[in-house]
Image (tube, coloured by chain):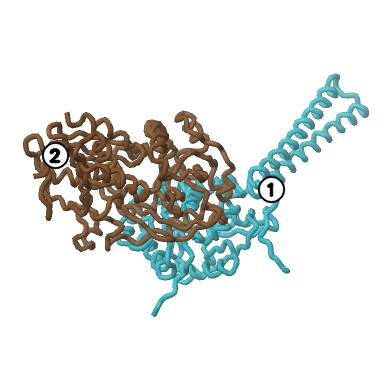
Chain colours: A brown, B cyan
Amino acid sequence: MERYDKVIIGAGLYGLYAALFCAKRGERVLVLEWDEQVFGRATYINQARVHMGYHYPRSLSTALKSAGYFERFNRDYGFCILKEFSQVYATSARFSWTDAGQFEKFCRAAHIRCDEVNPERYFRPGMCDGAFLTTEYTYDAQMLKNYFLEELGKYPHAGICCGVRIRRIIPDGSCFVAEMEDRPPVKADFLLNASYASTNQVLEMTEGLKGEPFQIKYELCEIILCEPGEALKPVGLTVMDGPFFSIMPFGKTGYHSLTSVTFTPHMTSYESLPVFPCQEKSGGYCSSRQLGNCSDCPARPLSAWPYMSRMAKKYMKDEYGFTYSHSLFSMKPILKNSELDDSRPTVVRQISEKPAFVSVLSGKINTVYDLDEVLINGGN
Amino acid sequence: MVEIKEKNFVSAVLYVHNAQQHLAEFLKKINGILAENFEHYELICVNDQSTDESVRIIADFAKGLEGASVSVLHMSYYQGVELSMNAGMDLAIGDFVLEFDKISGDFPDELLMQIYQTSLKGFDIVSAAPKRAERWTSKLFYQVYNRAAGKRTMLRTESFRILSRRAVNRVHSMCQSVPYRKAVYANCGLKTETLVYEPRERKGAICPEEKEMRRDMAFNSLILFTNLGYQVSSLLAGIMMLAALFIGIYTVVIFVGSRPVEGWTTTMLFLSLAFFGVFAIFAIIIKYLSVLIDLVFTKQQYVIEGVEKLK
């Protein structure tokens, strides 16, 4: 049986970051991925924001942490980051949990840039009571993927297996053994569960663990990619804080991503393992024990484009036009206790010591550095 | 047969306050008509602190629905139809917004599409009004209001209406808050139209808190949207000023003609002068207030219906 220092489940940013981090330390690592490709889900399918903290006007702790890692992420992965656009945050005049004055105060407290501009430059009269130019960037997941694949290629003792079907994970002395279909089992004394939406599913297939599953709910989310008109190209707009929308550059792809708080989540599951009515129609592709990739799923929902585009057009001035290109779908786990303040903490949880089992759950890419500590000390 | 549905997005905003009796039926009716005619639409139920089964009825209805968006907007406490409907309007995202102030399906099915078709002809606000069935209090209010408001659009009891996005935007830019929608709509300067229909039955009674709310609103809108209050109070101030003046003259005449008791003349002269001054100040304050109301409720100097390019 092949033995590794660390086996990592999930080839998203957190998985590959951990793999590269450990490979550089001279460890033997193996990444196991269910999809045929890496970065095929949440790392790619999201708003592609490099968060500076603006998003969390009701959670200063989340904001401060994002701002802290923002510089570091931009330094380390500058090649995949698009900076040349005006990122505008606006507070809706109605239904917002935060108004312009509160947002400004919050930005000052978090020490992040916020320059007031006239809301009517971007929005229809009366729709927003404040608009602010901010420093926030967007990353290109495909470029980031290529970088990680290239870097990891330099280390012969680091490997990625795609298309893997894990049957179960069992403890064996000081090791975990991952048994797979069509593939010989592998063992490691450190197992990192970086599978994001599948985190509870991986926990479920692991035997002999005493850890509680994450208290999460699941949202099936749609990100719409649109072709921006000339005026919109150099602009990203986010209306907050409540049932609003965001349209902003999607990495360096030339597309804009369109999302809205009310229409991006299509379905929600409150079970510990994700249970959705569409799973029955997926023809075995997806189940509550193993999530398929929603973007490739035959039972994926119809696009909410008519709703999201309406909402955006209700706010935006006509000159900022955009047209539909295509939709991406992905599953998003949300910690239940973060709903009230809308915070998005990064949770790194060590479920067992020897052998080590660590689960990580985070909704933001630039807090990936939170892994460092557990990767260094977790095994001891 | 391939059906061609309307491409425009329509939002229907329903005011729900203890409406369990007809709600299920009403939702089905509205949804049926919209689903048949529109590719995309949304239903927004504004729940103004219903204490009956209304919310459950909406939830049950939404469960069995596909291809449409249904939202319930819960008001924090009872706020009445005007404020609640304002909130519903702010949430609506449609190109056209249908407003249903009450859950009453007393209109014929085809009327809904008729008002939509009428609005497509260039009327930004189209209302559906029942032919009769007005309470005498409503009748009185509308008569007084229409007379006092003068040449502007006449108001009447309406059951529902459609607004174009342009009308919604216009209303937004005119007023910070909308205390009485009908009056604002009538004064927004865009083309409006009313379709009159024969109601199927007399509608049910309204609840006591609604009654009180309506009375307040009737009074407020008379004060805010007509110059009735200004006219009455400035007239009264004028009369009182004249009376004070008359007493002053009378005092002088008595002083000259027949010698009155000592001190009477000075007292009377002082009193008439003082009252004259007080009422003069009142007249000025009333004028100030009416100017202030104008400033608050009409942010823009003028309202236009549109620009037509002829050449």
On the image, the x and y values in percent for residue B63 come to: 30, 58
Q: Quick one: quadrant of the C terminus of chain A? A: top left
| Front in this rendered view, residue B222 or B297 | B297
> What's the chain of the residue with tag 2?
A
Q: Residue at x 21, y 46 (%)?
A: A159
On the image, the x and y values in percent for residue A337 come to: 29, 37
Q: Residue at x 70, y 42 (%)?
A: B291
Residue extending farthest to the right is: B256
Query: Would residue B219 be visible to someone looking at this image?
Result: no
Task: Please give the residue where the numbered disc 1 appears in the rendered image.
Answer: B227
Q: Quick one: quadrant of the N terminus of chain A? A: top left
Q: Residue at x 55, y 45 (%)?
A: B216
Amino acid tagged 2: Ala
Amino acid tagged 1: Asn
Task: Please give the residue where the numbered disc 2 appears in the rendered image.
Answer: A188
Q: Are marks 2 and 1 on the same chain?
A: no
Q: Which mark is residue A101?
A: none
Q: Residue at x 64, y 49 (%)?
A: B225
Q: Label 2, label 1: how many angstroms apart (C-alpha)? A: 84 Å
| Front in this rendered view, residue B268 or B201 | B201
Q: Quadrant of residue A16?
A: top left
